[in-house]
Image (tube, rainbow, N blue to C red):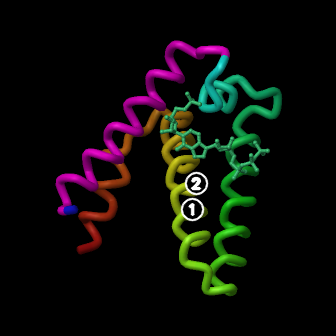
Amino acid sequence: MDDTDTDAVLDELFAVIEDRKERLPEDSYTASLFTHEKGENAVLEKLGEETTELVLAAKDDDHEEIGHEAADIVYHLLVLLAMKDMDVADLRSELRERR
Ligand SMILES: N=c1c2ncn([C@@H]3O[C@H](COP(=O)(O)OP(=O)(O)OP(=O)(O)O)[C@@H](O)[C@H]3O)c2ncn1[C@@H]1O[C@H](COP(=O)(O)O)[C@@H](O)[C@H]1O
C-alpha cells in the first residue's frame, strides 16, 4: 500500500462520517456520537478509553490488539474533527508542515 492508498482510506472514512453527521441514520454508531446526551464528551471519553486500551496492548506486545485499538482511535479522532467542523485535510496539513 502506498501513500495514495492510505490517504484514500482516511478520506473515504471521513466522507462516511460526514454523511452520518448530516443524515443521522438511526442505526448508525457514528450518528449516535453526534446526538449523544453527553454531547462531545461521548467521543472524548471513547478516545480516552481507546488510548488506555492501546497502552495496555502495547505493554502486552499484542500486535493484533495494537492494530485494533489504533484503528479505533483514528476512527474516533476523525469523528471528533467532524464534530469540530474540521476536516481530515487539517490533520494532513498539520503533519505535512512538520516534515
Ligand atoms: N471505523 C469504525 C469504527 N471503529 C470503532 N467503531 C465502533 O466503536 C464502538 C466502540 O468500540 P469499543 O472497542 O469500545 O467496542 P465496545 O466494547 O463494543 O464498546 P461499547 O459500544 O460497548 O462502548 C463499537 O461499537 C465499534 O463498532 C466504529 N464504528 C464505525 N466505524 C466506521 O464508520 C462506518 C459507519 O458506521 P456506522 O456509523 O455505524 O454506520 C463503518 O462502516 C466503519 O467504516
Q: Is residue 41 left or right of residue 70?
A: right
- The residue under the point 27% across, 55% down is 6
Q: Is residue 64 left or right of residue 9?
A: right
For the image, the number of numbered tags is 2
Crowding at mark 2 (Cα within 10 Å: few <14, some 14-19, many 20+) = some
Q: Position of residue 40 (x, y in %)?
A: 70, 38
The residue at which mark 2 appears reads as 72
Under tag 1, what secondary structure? helix
**Which residue type carries mark 2?**
Asp
Viewport quadrant of the C terminus:
bottom left
Q: Is mark 1 within 8 Å of ligand 1?
A: yes
Q: Main secondary structure of the magenta part?
A: helix
Under tag 2, what secondary structure? helix
**Which residue type carries mark 1?**
His
- The numbered disc on residue 46 is none
Residue 54 lies, with reference to residue 18, above or below; the image says below
Residues at discs 1 and 2 in contact (Cβ within 8 Å) = yes
Between residue 60 and residue 78, name the one nearer to us: 60
Q: Residue furthest right?
A: 37
Q: Is mark 2 within 8 Å of ligand 1?
A: yes
Q: Is residue 59 left or right of residue 99?
A: right
Residue 85 lies, with reference to residue 24, above or below; the image says below
- The numbered disc on residue 68 is 1
- The residue under the point 59% across, 15% down is 25
Q: Position of residue 98 (x, y in %)?
A: 29, 72
The span shown in magenta is 2-26
